[in-house]
Amino acid sequence: MRLLPAAPRAPRHAPFHTPSRVSKRALLVAILLSASLTAPGAYAATAHRKPAGKSIKLTSGTLTITFKPSVYAALTNASTPNGALIGNTLNSVAPASTLSAGVFTFPITAGNFNINARTGTVKTRGGLDFNYYYLRGGGGFALTRLELRYPPTVVSPHRTRQQPQLTATLTGEAPPAADTPVATLDMRHAKRVQRSHSITITQITLRVTTHPRSNPIAGLDGALEAGSVIGTASLTANG
């Protein structure tokens, strides 16, 4: 009598086995977490958070600029090697004010800023008045309507992102020149805080623009080169 081959035996561990006690517990935790995320209380807790990436329209606040001590000394008491230049003065232009030697504040009047995207503008009123005196006369200029500009990121292989800048309207011996570069804004050590209707940025490093010969401040302090630190800036603005 010919025997038929025996039917294959079922594997000891079926591929679709009943979940163990550990996997059941993990499933229960997942269900409870899912329920808590969709509970009314959890939604209410996140509903009042400010959406990421939202810009704030600025209406008030204060910008503070603190000059590096050596730079401030050069801007207020300089002399050329031959003694022709006998001194400089630096004063605030209202409604800006002088807090102490080398520290000036400017009222923020307008702007629009997105602290997450790091783009926008901060506009101020007032300015700085520079005067220099020679043995036979003198001159001066003023930087007014200071503005912090943070250009948007440009995603292109042929273009690079423009550096954030501090610009101003230059008035004095020549016709007024708006959008005059005063300093680049080095944000590597800056600290930023954004709330529902305000922003605070501190520890902004001010550096000479890439063309110091066209920079009015560098023109008074001949020791400044491109990238030299002028001072620091901080601001608190409200929307």
Image: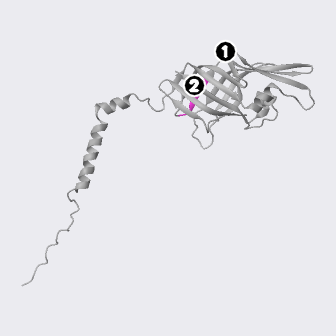
Q: Residue at x 46, y 33 (%)?
A: 52
The residue pinned by badge 2 equals: 236
Q: Nearer the viewer, residue 87 or 159?
A: 87
Depth order, front residue of 217/235: 235
In the rendering, at what x and y percent does residue 10 appear? Answer: 17, 68
SS class, disc 2: strand
Determine the residue located farthest toward the front in the rendered image.
Answer: 100
Point out the residue furthest to the top here: 94
Give the Cα distance between marks 1 and 2.
17 Å
* Rendered image quadrant of residue 178: top right
Q: Earlier in the sequence, mark 1 or mark 2?
A: 1
Task: Name the residue type under label 2.
Answer: Thr
Residue at screen point 76% across, 28% down: 72
- Which mark, by number, is residue 95? 1
Give the number of callouts.
2
What amino acid type is highlighted by mark number 1?
Pro
Mark yes or no: residue 177 visible.
Answer: no
Res. 37 image quadrant: top left
Please say whether residue 132 is one of the residues in the magenta stretch. no
- Residue 62, visible in the rendered structure: yes
Colour scheme of the rendered structure: one colour
Q: Position of residue 21 (x, y in %)?
A: 22, 55
Q: Residues within 10 Å of mark 2 (few under 14, many from 20)?
A: some
The residues colored magenta run: 117-122
The rendered magenta stretch, by its main secondary structure, is classed as strand
Which residue is nearer to you in this view: 72 or 165?
Answer: 72
Label 1 CA crowd tier, 10 Å (few <14, some 14–19, many 20+): few
x, y percent for residue 179: 69, 25
**Which corner quadrant holds the N terminus?**
bottom left
Secondary structure at numbered mark 1: loop
